[in-house]
Image (tube, helix red, strand yellow):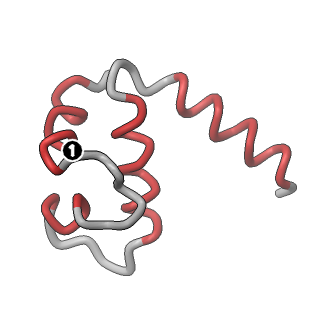
Amino acid sequence: MNADKLKAFRQTAYQCLGRSHDAMFELGDAVLSSPSVTSFAELSCSPLFRQQWSSLYEALQDSRP
């Protein structure tokens, strides 16, 4: 996959995430880059999740299915 296709995919995915798109997108990056995920708290400490820890829970509550 070339860089332009990846960029277009990420932009399209970002637009589908609803009100909390920043936090949801960063959550996705944190999940995909973590070798194993054991808790939401662990994900909120990821360097790729730059939001406050409570944003993780709010994003999941506010996101579209």
Q: Is residue 14 above or below residue 56?
A: above
Q: Few, some or many C-alpha atoms within 10 Å of disc 1 (few <14, some 14-19, many ≥20)? A: many
Q: Is residue 13 above or below residue 40?
A: above
Tag 1 residue: 56
Q: Which residue does the image show at 74% across and 48% down from the upper left?
A: 6
Is 11 situated left or right of 23 in this image?
right
Amino acid found under the numbered disc labelled 1: Leu
User: Measured from the top left, where is residue 31 in percent x and y?
Assistant: 37, 62
Is 22 situated left or right of 10 in this image?
left
Quadrant of the rendered image containing residue 5: top right
Q: Which residue does the image show at 21% across and 44% down from the upper left?
A: 56
User: Measured from the top left, where is residue 16 in percent x and y?
Assistant: 50, 23
The quarter in which the C terminus is drawn is top left
Quadrant of the rendered image containing residue 36: bottom left
Q: Secondary structure at mark 1?
A: helix
Q: Nearer the viewer, residue 42 or 37?
A: 42
Is 47 situated left or right of 58 in this image?
right
Q: Which residue does the image show at 35% across and 50% down from the upper left?
A: 27
Q: Nearer the viewer, residue 16 or 23?
A: 23
Outermost residue, bottom side: 35
The quarter in which the N terminus is drawn is bottom right
Q: Is residue 10 above or below residue 30?
A: above
Q: Nearer the viewer, residue 26 or 31?
A: 26
User: Measured from the top left, where is residue 30 in percent x and y?
Assistant: 39, 61
